[in-house]
Amino acid sequence: MHADWLDKMLSIKTKSLKYKYIKLNNFVFSHFDYGFPHLGYVPARPSDDLCLIILKLLEMKIIVTGSLGNIGKPLTKNLIQHGHDVTVISSKPERKPAIEALGAKAAIGTMQDVNFLSKTFEGADAVYLMETLDHSTFFDPDIDILADIAAIGTNYKQAIENSGVKRVVLLSSIGAHTNKGNGSLVMHYNVENILKELPEDVHIKFMRPPGFFTNIFRSLQTIKLQGKIISNYGGDKKEPWVSPLDIADKIAEEMEKTFDGREIHYIASDEVSPNEIAKIIGEAIGSPLKWVAISDEELLNNMLSIGMNAQIAKGFVEMQAAQGTGELYEDFYLHKPTFGKVKLEDFAKEFALFYNSQN
């Protein structure tokens, strides 16, 4: 009879909600993985209407910040497929059609507008937060990226307090466990600590990924012109990398689980060395590729010579130096996660397609 009940539930096609754990005991939903209370007794063969009511109870209203980026788009798709009511925040009005095409609602505004954020967060069961600045600001000599990112974190904190949201997922970063020796990643340490000031009944999951595979696109020009990826570290020492797709999957999974206090979740897809990256990407594009290590000073001067903001350039150099020594990953390896599905070889195919389209 339990099997009949479950078959009935899962046969409803109007929702496509993924269940992680449903325990049936005498036809009682005794526990939902995302913390819903008991729903009481139900008949062994419920009607379609009753199934839809239960599915409606499982549906959450979720706010996604960051528009339709490398994480936001697959995350939104995932949550929509799971039957949730999703609103995506974007600062660009022209993104509204693309957001609505996914089945989500669009809220047009900025992370700098506390009133907009507060209004958008109202009535939400959970919010996904990330901080970002326009890439053009990296070349603005007057910007203080640490202050600007902290201001966004403060805005989020105020909006959460104003709206009454109790469940938060924050995209943080590896290195956020410390404010020493992590370069520009100290911004994530700062935002985590801003949100930790929220009342204890606001439950927060801090998601800490390492470098994205997609960061390799930053080296596209030197790969094309010199056959090199250039950094201030290199060699055969493995380090964790992550695909935005695995980040999106993990966030969607955690949205549907119980929230309990403050939790830290590391996310990774693969573990490869700089030389392995050069080899695999080179094979994918059909051209020999080397990872070349230069000094901290030379890398910094290269960045400053193209007009990069000095604070950002210095933070980037310090961050990559910590990658080379392994100091950046000390806390990661104390809490090493199960790796995701996307591997470097998978990303290399994506990179090769883009690389070859540019030739």
Image (tube, rainbow, N blue to C red):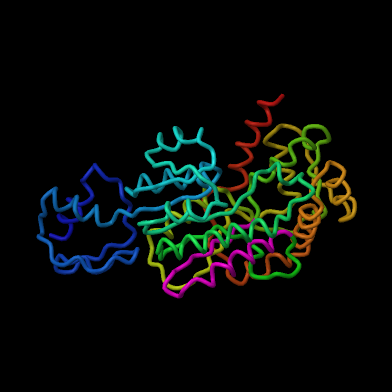
- The image position of residue 121, as x and y in percent, is 42, 55
Q: Position of residue 251 (x, y in %)?
A: 47, 56
As displayed, is residue 353 above or below residue 34? above
Q: Nearer the viewer, residue 294 or 14?
A: 14
**Number of dots carrying numbers:** 0
Residue 29: percent from left, percent from top = 21, 65
Which quarter of the image is occupied by the N terminus? bottom left
The magenta stretch spans residue 146: no
Q: Nearer the viewer, residue 108 or 343?
A: 108
Q: Residue at x 80, y 43 (%)?
A: 290
Q: Residue at x 36, y 44 (%)?
A: 81
Residue lying furthest bottom in this view? 200
| 77 horizontally vs 227: left or right | left
Instruction: Pick out the residue farthest to the front.
Output: 115
Relative height, residue 173 to residue 308 (above, below):
below
At horizontal 21% and vertical 46% (from top left) the residue drawn is 11
In reply to whether residue 189 is colored magenta, the answer given is yes
Q: Quarter holding the C terminus?
A: top right
Magenta-tinted stretch: 184-210
Q: Nearer the viewer, residue 148 or 5?
A: 148
| Picture coordinates of residue 259, whole percent (x, y) | 41, 67
Residue 269 as seen in the image, left or right of residue 318 = left
Instruction: Give whichever of 33, 143 is nearer the camera.
Output: 143
